[in-house]
Image (cartoon, grey):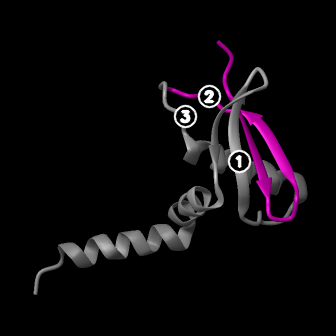
């Protein structure tokens, strides 16, 4: 079976398409987003804007679609600021007075 293709449309209209290896049966949205952002940056030579819509497809059939909200959550979690805030939140919750 061939790997699914992750298709991402960015806020500026640029579209990236790439096959994404999946280690399990569940499609990995975070991996698709990371690869799409890297492909955008490599192609355009600037940091990527937000991805506004995306989907996985195989042999022309859409396997799963993602809306702006799902993509925003992935972008927030994978951004350096999002990761830093997540770490701070975990440290604060674990702190004792």
Q: Which residues are magenta?
A: 1-23
Q: Where is 5 relative to 50, above or below?
A: above
- Residue 74, position as x, y percentages in the image: 55, 57
Closer to the camera: disc 2 or disc 1?
1
Query: Secondary structure under badge 2?
Result: loop
Between disc 2 and disc 3, whose residue precedes?
A: 2
Check disc 3: other Cα within 10 Å, few if <14, some if 14-19, many if 20+: some
Of circles 2 and 3, which is in front?
3
Is 9 magenta? The answer is yes
| Disc 1 to disc 3, C-alpha distance | 13 Å
Q: Which image quarter is the N terminus in? A: top right
Please tell me which residue lies in front, 14 or 21.
14
Residue of label 1 = 54
Rate crowding at label 2 as few (under 14), some (14 to 19) or many (20 or more) other CA atoms within 10 Å. Answer: some
Instruction: Give me the disc on residue 27.
Output: 3
- Direction top: furthest residue: 1
Label 2 – label 1 distance at C-alpha: 17 Å
Please tell me which of labels 1 and 3 falls first in the chain.
3
Disc 2 target residue: 21
Question: Which numbered dot is residue 16?
Answer: none
| Quadrant the C terminus occupies | bottom left
């Amino acid at each position: 079976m061939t790997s699914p293709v992750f298709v991402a449309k960015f806020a500026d209209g640029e579209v990236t398409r790439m096959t994404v290896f999946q280690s399990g049966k569940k499609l990995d949205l975070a991996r698709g987003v990371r690869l799409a952002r890297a492909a955008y940056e490599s192609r355009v030579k600037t940091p990527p804007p937000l991805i506004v819509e995306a989907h996985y497809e195989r042999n022309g059939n859409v396997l799963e679609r993602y809306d702006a909200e799902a993509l925003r959550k992935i972008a927030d979690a994978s951004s350096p600021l999002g990761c830093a805030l997540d770490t701070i939140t975990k440290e604060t919750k674990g702190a004792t007075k």
